[in-house]
Amino acid sequence: MFEIRILRRYEITNKLKSSIYVASFITGILIFALIEVIYGANPYDVMSKLFVKPLTSYADLQITIRYAVPIGIMALGLTLTYKSGIYSIGSEGQMAVGAIFAAWTAYAFNYIEPPTSIVIALLAGALGGLLWALVPGILKGLLNVNEVLTTLMFNFIAYSLTDYLIYGPWRSPRAYGFPLTEPIPKSYVILPTDGIPVINISTFILSVFLMYAIIKKSVFGYQVRAYGSNPTAAKSAGISFLKVALLCLAISGAFAGLAGALQLTSVHNRLGPKSWSVTEGLGYTAIVSAWLARLEPWFVLPSAILLGALINGGLTIKAVLGQPEGVVNIMNGVILLSIIAADFFINYRFVIKVRE
């Protein structure tokens, strides 16, 4: 007779922790590949298009970076909030509002020339995301309202605001009836260099340094980590929860808004409905990236690139292999579940005893 017990781990080596994460991630990918096989896809084609082609083909690498940059920038903001024990899922809506603010800036100040125009658009996007995160931050800090609910609700409000603009006052009369805005002025468009979005990549890397400095080197970062580790002790030490909640969500929102502005100015160049959406669901993918990076700013770089490659490969699978529309969402969900499973095995272990 077998007896299975679950015991808490009180100590675990970094090597074992890393091994658990790698094994869990590989398991998640294999489960997704199995799902694809069930749909009739060749497993070799699936794995090749998911991992090899998006990172080795020059053309595909450009697409991978196009997804990795906004995912990574938003994931950096989320690492801050999650380290404080605040679980925002509002990057999607904050990204959308950041794009709206950047678009308004481009339309209103179309006489400004680059590079000033680009800087203003990116700052406007960051401001939009910050403002959109303030209400959930205030509600969390003052009334301890569940931030998961408020940030999620604000995502849908942001969607509705975008729809109002593209179907209403910002709808282009030259879009042949499609709900699209006018393209932003050329002075606000970020052009790649030899196919590589240099400004986007530079912004991402600078964001990594900035978030590392905030979390690891600043007094506020210490307060954030203190609340995340022991809220009672942090409160007893006189650390203001209102300050932590408000600033965490505001900074996270600013990063998401910056990502939205980058996507608008470098990829989409106009606002549109879901098919042309600036956000493309990347705000939710950023949640996976943050947890995959173990809430460490430096690890966000590889995790964002990996997820950018997986999205690129997932879209290829959908188009070339004829897979369902939600294939990318299924992949993200499976990977996120594998990360959650990894956390479980890091904190607990199974003990199997045989009884006679």
Image: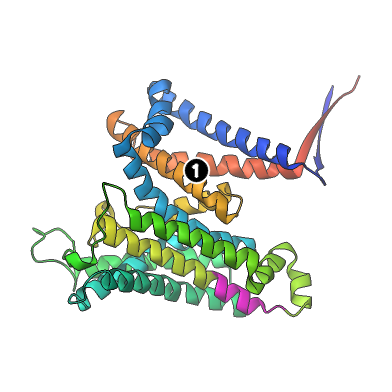
Instruction: Give the x, y percent position of residue 207.
Output: 48, 62
Q: Which of 102 and 1 lies nearest the eye of the viewer?
A: 102
Instruction: Give the x, y percent position of residue 352.
Output: 82, 28
Q: Report the residue at 23% width, 72% height from top.
A: 106
Q: Which of 41 and 49 lies nearest the eye of the viewer?
A: 49
Instruction: Give the x, y percent position of residue 33.
Output: 46, 28
In which quarter of the view is residue 216 placed?
Answer: bottom right
Q: Report the residue at 41% width, 33% height from top.
A: 50
Within 10 Å of the Cα at label 1, are there few (<14), some (14-19), or many (20+) other Cα atoms? some
Q: Which of 157 and 304 lies nearest the eye of the viewer?
A: 304
Structure colour scheme:
rainbow
Q: Is residue 184 visible?
A: no
Residue indicated by mark 1? 333
Quadrant where the C terminus is found in the figure: top right
In this picture, residue 320 sits left or right of residue 29: left
In which quarter of the view is residue 141 placed?
Answer: bottom right
Q: Report the residue at 36% width, 62% height from top.
A: 260
Q: Report the residue at 22% width, 78% height from top.
A: 109
In which quarter of the view is residue 123 placed?
Answer: bottom left
Residue 240 part of the magenta-drawn span: yes
Q: Is residue 222 visible?
A: yes
Segment tinted magenta in the rendering: 239-248
